[in-house]
Image: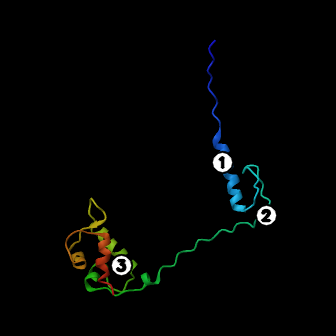
């Protein structure tokens, strides 16, 4: 007579592995020699904690070096206007000028195609990246 072949049911090993891990972590965390296994669903908290206080988000203070008004060269004044401005305002006004006059490269928005006024500030007529722009503009701030 031939033996009847039956499929075995898979053993759930994942649950057993996680249970072992929790026991090990309890041992490490508490430093105790014996650790008891508690499942998270049935475990009750015995210690009374103070209610968690929520941190109120405050507005970040700007760095004083960035907010210091700087004198602007004559060429840059033609582009962004007169008056001492902080670095942050200079960058904002430059980008407003670039977008108003549509000087961003159509294919690569990180590049700027300068017009006559910006070419004097940048020192070149060729297209430059926005990272090079800050480097060129810093020479016009004192």
Q: First in sequence: mark 3 or mark 1?
A: 1
Q: Is residue 61 left or right of residue 72?
A: right
Contact between marks 1 and 2 (CB within 8 A): the answer is no
- Say which residue appears at 68% left-offset and 49% top-offset: 20
Circle 1 or circle 2, nearest the eye: 1
Q: Could you tell me which quadrant the N terminus lies in?
A: top right
Image position, residue 97 (x, y; %): 30, 72
**Gap between marks 3 and 2 measured at Cα:** 54 Å
Q: Is residue 38 left or right of residue 75?
A: right
**Gap between marks 3 and 1 measured at Cα:** 57 Å
Q: Dot 2, how many residues are within 10 Å of its Cα: few (below 14), some (14-19), or many (20+)?
A: few
Depth check: 48 or 55 in front?
48
| Residue identified by numbered label 3 | 90
Q: Dot 3, how many residues are within 10 Å of its Cα: few (below 14), some (14-19), or many (20+)?
A: many
- Residue 18, label in figure: 1
Q: Is residue 21 left or right of residue 126?
A: right
**Gap between marks 1 and 2 measured at Cα:** 28 Å
For the residue labelled by badge 1, is the local secondary structure a helix, a strand or a loop? helix
**Residue at the right extreme?**
46
The number of numbered discs placed on residues in the rendered structure image is 3
Depth check: 140 or 24 in front?
24
Q: First in sequence: mark 3 or mark 2?
A: 2
Q: Dot 1, how many residues are within 10 Å of its Cα: few (below 14), some (14-19), or many (20+)?
A: few
Task: Indicate the quadrant where residue 52 lies.
Answer: bottom right
Circle 3 or circle 1, nearest the eye: 1
Q: Could you tell me which quadrant the C terminus lies in?
A: bottom left
**Residue at the top extreme?**
1
Asked if 26 appears above or below 131 in the picture, the reply is above
For the residue labelled by badge 2, is the local secondary structure a helix, a strand or a loop? loop
| Residue identified by numbered label 2 | 48
**Residue at the front extreme?**
1
């Amino acid at each position: 007579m031939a033996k009847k072949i039956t499929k075995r049911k898979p053993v759930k090993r994942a649950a057993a592995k996680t249970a072992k891990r929790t026991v090990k972590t309890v041992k490490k965390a508490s430093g105790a020699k014996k650790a008891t296994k508690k499942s998270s669903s049935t475990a009750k908290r015995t210690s009374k904690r103070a209610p968690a206080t929520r941190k109120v988000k405050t507005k970040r203070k700007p760095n004083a070096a960035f907010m210091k008004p700087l004198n602007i060269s004559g060429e840059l004044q033609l582009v962004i206007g007169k008056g001492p401005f902080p670095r942050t305002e200079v960058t904002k006004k430059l980008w407003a000028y670039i977008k108003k006059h549509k000087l961003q490269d159509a294919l690569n928005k990180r590049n700027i195609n300068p017009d006559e006024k910006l070419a004097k500030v940048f020192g070149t007529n060729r297209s430059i990246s926005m990272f090079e722009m800050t480097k060129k503009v810093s020479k016009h701030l004192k």
